[in-house]
Amino acid sequence: MSDYRLNTKCVQAGYTPSNGEPRQIPIVQSTTFKYDTSEDMGKLFDLEASGYFYTRLQNPTNDHVAAKIAALEGGTAGMLTSSGQAANFYSLFNICECGSHIVSSSSIYGGTFNLISVTMKKMGIDVTFVAPDASEEELNAAFKENTRAVFGETIANPALTVLDIEKYAKAAHAHGVPLIIDNTFPTPVNCRPIEWGADIVTHSTTKYMDGHGAAVGGAIVDSGKFDWMAHADLFPGLTTPDDSYHGITYAEKFGKEGAFITKATAQIMRDLGSIQSPQNAFILNLGLESLHVRMPRHVENGQAVAEFLEGHDKVESVNYPGLKSNKYYDVAQKYLGGGGCGVVSFVLKGGRPAAESFMKRLKLAAIETHVADARTCCLNPATSTHRQMTEEQLNAAGIPAGMVRMSCGLEDKADLIDDLKQALEF
Ligand SMILES: *Cc1c(COP(=O)(O)O)cnc(C)c1O
């Protein structure tokens, strides 16, 4: 499957049925698996034979879908998690522990920001946030002796900043640690961070990968490129025996290609248990089968809506990486070949009342706390997700009261623009 092009992989990677087997990936809705003798099962536990025994650790449906996502990202191994939050937490916690430090872009999803700055801090894991467009010097200055990972989002949700992945990878590697990239917004159709030097890629599959607003999920993909043994002292969890798992040294037994995901499965998933249900994995795969067809339409609609809004006199500013006026236009062209996703944010003149009147009039675009599915939706952070903040706090956070975030779906762009036109006549 590795020789096929991305479009083909979206449809067929991860599962190749044999003679007489189901054409579609079967949903193995079973918690457990049956064996004839306890000897047979013992071999599984001793890792002498491979096979399934309990769905918290592995399930065939999930494995097929994870293998497809790994193939799409150009990685060597992948795993599914119950949500994007779990994917980001596991990817970090797999190599960080109490006393570790993370360098992260400050422009990331709010849930991930809280995860790193509040919850992981309580676990004794420290963080230094840096601007997404930090200079090489600023990036290098953020590292400490105990830094174990660098984290960022290709296109940040909701700020829509675009990360210079090569620059971040260079800084991470100069300090002997991997770069973890959350590639949720562009999906591998619009950007494959591993090709630009990222070591681990994460996803909230809840967004475009599912693409229909049907199933919450996450995924982690390992590039198989990071040499844990070359930095053995920094990553003892991978490079010394795991007493909780047969005394195995993951980096020795599974090599660069398999160590990270095997540890994240056999240790972190085993102990924390945020497994994706096989039913959701099946739904996710239905989304993946058309990802390459859907993403260009999301981008086309996003670009058209952004250009329309930029020319409208009730609109103060528009933020979309595919606009020539955008600060990240050049970076977006390099990494995404355009706007990269269907999410556009804009600020209406007239603040909160203007945003409220405008959104009330929308007919196609529904008001939702969601982005990145087939149906266009929008949100005014000031009256929803950021409701507790004052006008001053909103401005300081770069989320003015009149800001609307719009996720362009797969409808006809002319209808979306007509809907905006009439809604702007408030
Ligand atoms: C939504 C999102 C997450 C969190 O994913 P869930 O599936 O909601 O847990 C993480 N990162 C990004 C970029 C997101 O957009």
Image (tube, rainbow, N blue to C red):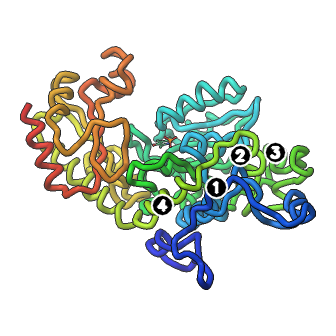
Residue picked out by circle 2:
269
Task: Check disc 4 and give the amino acid type.
Answer: Pro
What separation in Å lies between label 2 and label 3 (alpha carbons)? 15 Å
Q: Nearer the viewer, mark 4 or mark 2?
A: 2
Task: Check disc 2 and give the amino acid type.
Answer: Met
Residue picked out by circle 1:
79
**Which numbered disc, 3 or 4, marks the residue that appears first in the sequence?**
4
**Which numbered disc, 2 or 3, marks the residue that appears first in the sequence?**
3
Residue at the spot 47% in from the left edge and 69% down from the top edge: 10
Task: Check disc 3 and give the amino acid type.
Answer: Gly
What separation in Å lies between label 4 and label 2 (alpha carbons)? 24 Å
Mark 1 crowdedness (10 Å alpha carbons): few <14, some 14-19, many ≥20: many
Left or right, 333 with reference to 193: left
Residue at the spot 26% in from the left edge and 59% down from the top edge: 300
Task: Check disc 1 and give the amino acid type.
Answer: Met
Residue picked out by circle 4:
188
Mark 4 crowdedness (10 Å alpha carbons): few <14, some 14-19, many ≥20: many
Contact between marks 2 and 1 (CB within 8 A): the answer is yes
